[in-house]
Amino acid sequence: MKKQTVFKILVPVLFSFLMSNTALAHKVTVFAWVEGNTVCGEGKFSGGRKAQGAEVAVYDPAGKRLLTTKTDENGSFSFPVPQKTAMKIELLAGMGHKGEWTIPLEEVTAAADTDRGGERTGVHPDAKLPENSEKSSEKSTDAGLSEISAKNALMPDLPDREELQKMIQTSVEKSLDEKLKPVIRMLADSQQKGPALNEIVGGIGYIFGIMGLALYFRAKKKGGLPEK
Amino acid sequence: MHISEGILSAPVLISGVALAAAGTAIGLKKLEDQKIPQAAILSAAFFVASLIHVPIGPSSAHLILNGIVGLLLGWAAFPAILIALLLQGMLFQFGGITTLGVNTVIMAAPAVICYFLFGFLIHRNGAVSFCASFACGFLSVFFSGILVGLALMFTEENFFAVASAVVTVHIPIMIIEGFVAAFCISFLKKVRPELLPFRESEPIVMPKGAQQTAESSTL
């Protein structure tokens, strides 16, 4: 009897340890993405409620804490990229609720590269202030004309093709970021979806399966299944 | 109520596993064959109850139903809740696998405590029975909150803050569960009194259908 009891406890426990990789996510979920030079994210409970005022801790791959912040009343948070490393974001929603999200290195470096480009383009308007004013005055006259003249005016600004390529790349990535925002949000929402029907029904099925097993073993122990 | 992985320290986790294992062993020993289907049904109810969220308060609280599970199963609440929590962890990612022991103790221990505190009262007349089962549903959630505070005390170092936060979040849950338990018990008393514990204390008038099933199960 005792042996069987121990067996009955041990088997699910061992099984669950094998499955623990799939069960690393938690009741509170975090989803974070890199937007330019900032990391944005959201924390949600499994019921769809936002995790408000929850603590957010950011770690590098070595486990060093880089910074901490808090979620606002919408459950979202953002912080500047502290370092060009992969980041592990932990959300502590209190009462033993914790969620994790990892931002891979590629995502951070890609964003950081475009950001460097962005800074460069950001410098340009200041340096060439008179041209800017010229442009704006031309805009009021004629669209086609201003385009041509703007091109002419811009030409001397672009010493080589590389610079131009970088500028184009930056603006493309910026507009892509803008355009992809809703998609990323959708992704975040789907990441934080609650349990599906098949999981619920499956769980109930497991419980009744276990019941069947328990009844079977009990009946067997008593000396065979009862005859009708 | 489910404590996530990576929060508790190893000693708390290990003692949780030890307590849960002890409770489960006692529960399995005390679980009569006729009660296995009932335990499974209650386990399934517990499993699904956690999906019913009550959107009140800053956190996210859901039904627990450990009071009614404990009241009807006694010590067998431990294996029933353990299995339900294991499946919740695996399928819904509620709680976690390493915290399974602690979570089992958090939910099952109050259930057993309430069973011994109020179980013998449910066969009294209407009002007393109603109050006892309400208190059972109400207090088992309350004790669970206290246990969450105890478990987190060693990491967050503020027992009263955590425990009171958990309890306040769960006040609506406690009231709902109190009523669920009360109505369940009064319903079962009318329809299936043989399912209730402590029935030796009073003579039971079995309804016809119940008598038949009782006879067939003894055969």
Image (cartoon, helix red, strand yellow):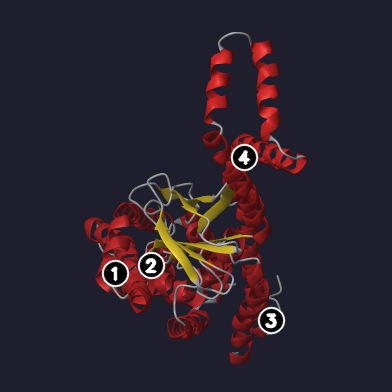
The nearer-to-camera label among 3 and 1 is: 1
In front of the other: B22 or B132: B22
* Residue B172 x, y percent position in the rendering: 31, 51
User: Which residue is labeled 4 in the image?
Assistant: A177
Residue at the far right: name it.
A161
User: Which residue is labeled 3 in the image?
Assistant: A220
Image quadrant holding the C terminus of chain A, namely bottom right
Asked which secondary structure carries label 3, the reply is: helix
Tell me, yes or no, whether dots 4 and 1 are on the same chain.
Answer: no
> Image quarter for residue B9?
bottom left
Residues under numbered marks 2 and 4 in contact, where contact means CB atoms less than 8 Å apart: no
What residue do we see at 59% from left, 70% from top?
A: A61
* Separation of marks 3 and 4 at Cα, in angstroms: 64 Å
Which amino acid, by three-letter code, is at mark 2?
A: Leu
Asked which secondary structure carries label 1, the reply is: helix
* Separation of marks 2 and 3 at Cα, in angstroms: 29 Å
Which amino acid, by three-letter code, is at mark 4?
A: Asp
* Residue A98 x, y percent position in the rendering: 47, 64
Q: Which mark is residue B118?
A: 1
The nearer-to-camera label among 3 and 4 is: 4
The nearer-to-camera label among 2 and 3 is: 2
In front of the other: A204 or A211: A204
Which amino acid, by three-letter code, is at mark 3?
A: Lys
Above or below A22: residue A2: below
In front of the other: A95 or B37: A95
Of the residues under marks 2 and 1, which one precedes in the sequence?
2
User: Which residue is labeled 2 in the image?
Assistant: B71
> Image quarter for residue B107?
bottom left
* Separation of marks 4 and 1 at Cα, in angstroms: 60 Å
Above or below A99: residue B52: above
Tell me, yes or no, whether dots 3 and 4 are on the same chain.
Answer: yes
